Amino acid sequence: MANKIPRVPVREQDPKVRATNFDEVCYGYDKEEALLEASRCLNCRNPRCMTACPVGLQIPRFIAELAAGNIAGAAAVIAEDSSLPAVCGRVCPQETQCEGSCVLGVKGEPVAIGKLERFVADYSRELAGSSPLETSGSDMAAAGNQPSETVAARGLVNGGDPLRSGGGDERGEVSEGCVTRCRRKVAVIGSGPAGLACASDLAKWGYDVTIFEALHKAGGVLEYGIPEFRLPKEKVLRHEIDDVRKLGVKIETNVIVGRTITIDSLMDKEGFEAVFIGTGAGLPKFMNIPGENLCGVFSANEFLTRNNLMKAWREDYLTPIHAGKKVCVVGGGNVAMDAARTALRLGAEVHIVYRRTEAELPARREEVHHAAQEGIIFDMLTNPVEVIGDEKGWVKALKCIRMELGEPDESGRRSPVPIAGSEFEIPTETVIMALGTSPNPLISKTTQGLETNRRGCLVASEEGATTRPGVFAGGDAVTGAATVILAMGAGRTAARAIDAYLKQKS
Amino acid sequence: MYQILTKEMLTPTICRMSVKAPRLAAAAQPGQFLIVRADEKGERIPLTISDFNAEQGSVTIVTQKIGASSADIIAYEPGEAFADVVGPLGLPSEFVNMPPEKLARQRYILIAGGVGTAPVYPQAKWLKEHGVPVDVIIGAKTKDLLIYVEEMRPVCDNLFICTDDGSAGFKGMGTNMLEKVVSDGHSYTQAVIIGPMIMMKFTTLTCRKLGIPAIVSLNTLMVDGTGMCGACRVSVGGKTRFACVEGPEFDGYEVDFDEAMRRQGQYKTEEAETNEKHVCKIGRGR
């Protein structure tokens, strides 16, 4: 039986070697491995994996195509719901979502859904890159590799109902769709996961979508936050963003909404009928402890942006970056792991300083495991109280206090309590603060009628409607820092709400 | 791409360029800045905006050759284009949004040092256009390093020039010039100081001595310029502020200049290495 086959292990770069380079850690499946792993799927009648996916990817359907050897067909199934499969296959927390819900996981190992998604995306991309002629066939066309005109046409037919309705009244929607959707302008602010997902759906349905991006490259956190060794930029990310462009989405970089233009000017002067705000949570938090402005104290955002977006790790780029011989990264989330593993690759001894225990680390298990394998040192139950500087104003040590776990707090986690008199110093050259991020107030401060909550997040309904008519929002800008896939889910939900709003408006 | 429309060398190391950036030009206000990335491999360099023309869709930048990245920017010629120009960044000068009745009571002295003279120009121009009394001090090490002297004359009431070596105008620094101007009977409700960090520090001290409130424009390190990286953080009145989104202008009395100067030099070692290795390829062999 299919479920007797053990989960196919995935090949990875040797930890000792990868600790010195920025090449991708995980090699992914080859075709043989992927087909074998795909054969493990039971194709459940009630696919819990799909329910657990924030974008509702049709997981059993794509895996069935893959198991049958129809990789292009699998890609087409995925493309119906996601423009970023090679990204999601790499960075989604599958263990708590699709794979966490897989029936096979009850008694054994769940199907490696993420690795399969990644294989389908990588295989299709490499095929498209190597021999363009082969990809012009009809099944690859649906995978998003075709010119935008065909996509627009397909979008109008397939996109009859934003939620797959099983194709009941799609024909009726074609003419109606053109009146209510064609050439109506929608602005999407931010080209991260939320914005890309929202823009993709809207473009498939025939809307004229422009994404405004503040930085010089599209991708948001996928570009500036997630390092090359987890998500290769040129090979993987660029390609998937180009796929979004091929849907007809325009991306205007170097436009800061709230400075270069405003939501008002977009709606009043440039004719955008609806706006989606997917600006993420880009504002770094600091601890507000003494010495935090010393030289050598960086936000994880700065450290990662210099390395990822500005490519400081590459000799041929001008961007400076400072790691030194020893680095303390404060925090325990995925961003802390990314910063730590980046500093390690730049040649430093790296400590993760976290106030709870390893069991409470908010980072994905896989990331913690990879970090430990590579030689990151975990200083748990340790909380910084002061950064100590030398006479030149540079960091020389991080003063910390030992913690112990007390009573559970409102999040259910046992809250860390300082142990009196246990202060000690960790000598270090660099301190990187990875304490989480909050939404950037640039837009909320410059837009009338947009409410925010106490944490600076935009107030929005479950469908993504903000307190201002015609303006929608989703992703980290609404929830505070979360995951790529939740942001994509919110982007898709808001796309449906924008579609409904514009239909009703006309 | 952002095309360079005009270029002229104001001194052997200071270059003025006008660049096509229509959205930016339409939104810019005095006091704001922009970021240029010359090419794919360049840094994002924050530069002050020294003029903007919404009709032409152009902005004027003045760059001083300091390191590898600024040398790359200066090497561009009209007709060529920068990969990226983004802005306007930061908040406009305080006077831009001041209630008219308050503005009518102001008498400004704008004190410019070196390349910091360029961003003083749009401020003086704005004040002059709005009928606010405005005097300007331009200071430089020596005559050859003075910029914007002729441009400034028509946009201020009194222009005072000083050089450290006395080769042009008053012999002395901006601080000495300011003391002289005040002792000669001029009085001001507000000073705006733009120049090197050390010059802003000492000019602020002089302003304090003379009882003139002082605003300074901080040229801190930055990456994104939108509040994302925190490289620009400065201590103002004991609180950490982000110069890119809460500044660049702050109350000079409250700024911790010593910390700001240290932070500005954070990447000196790395940059020195880059400068040694870097061979500028831009504008060569074309």
Image (tube, coloured by chain):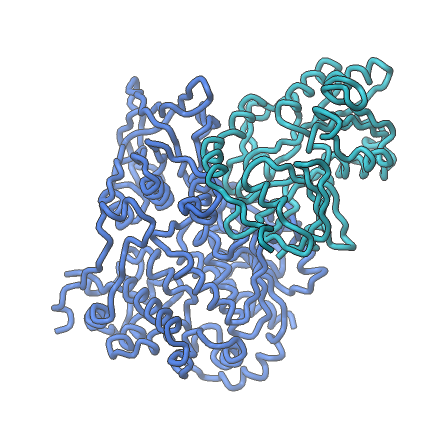
Chain colours: A blue, B cyan
Q: Is residue A239 visible?
A: yes
Q: Residue at x 42, y 35 (%)?
A: A322
Q: Residue at x 40, y 21 (%)?
A: A388
The part of the image, by quadrant, that contains residue A231 is: bottom left
- Frontmost residue, B148 versus B207: B148
Image quarter where the N terminus of chain A lies is bottom left
Q: Position of residue A369 (x, y in %)?
A: 24, 46
Q: Position of residue A138 (x, y in %)?
A: 41, 83
Q: Looking at the picture, does residue B263 appear above or below residue A337?
A: above
Q: Looking at the picture, does residue A473 appear above or below residue A420?
A: below
The part of the image, by quadrant, that contains residue B163 is: top right
Q: Is residue A411 visible?
A: no
Asked if residue A350 lies left or right of residue A256, the reply is: left
State the residue lying farthest toward the bottom. A171
Q: Looking at the picture, does residue A260 appear above or below residue B185?
A: below
State the residue lying farthest toward the front. B285
Q: Position of residue A370 (x, y in %)?
A: 25, 47
Image quarter where the C terminus of chain A lies is bottom right
Asked if residue A457 lies left or right of residue B7, the reply is: left
- The mark tally for this picture is 0
Asked if residue A86 lies left or right of residue A447, the reply is: left
- Frontmost residue, A315 versus A224: A315
Q: Position of residue A437 (x, y in %)?
A: 46, 42
- Frontmost residue, B118 versus B97: B118
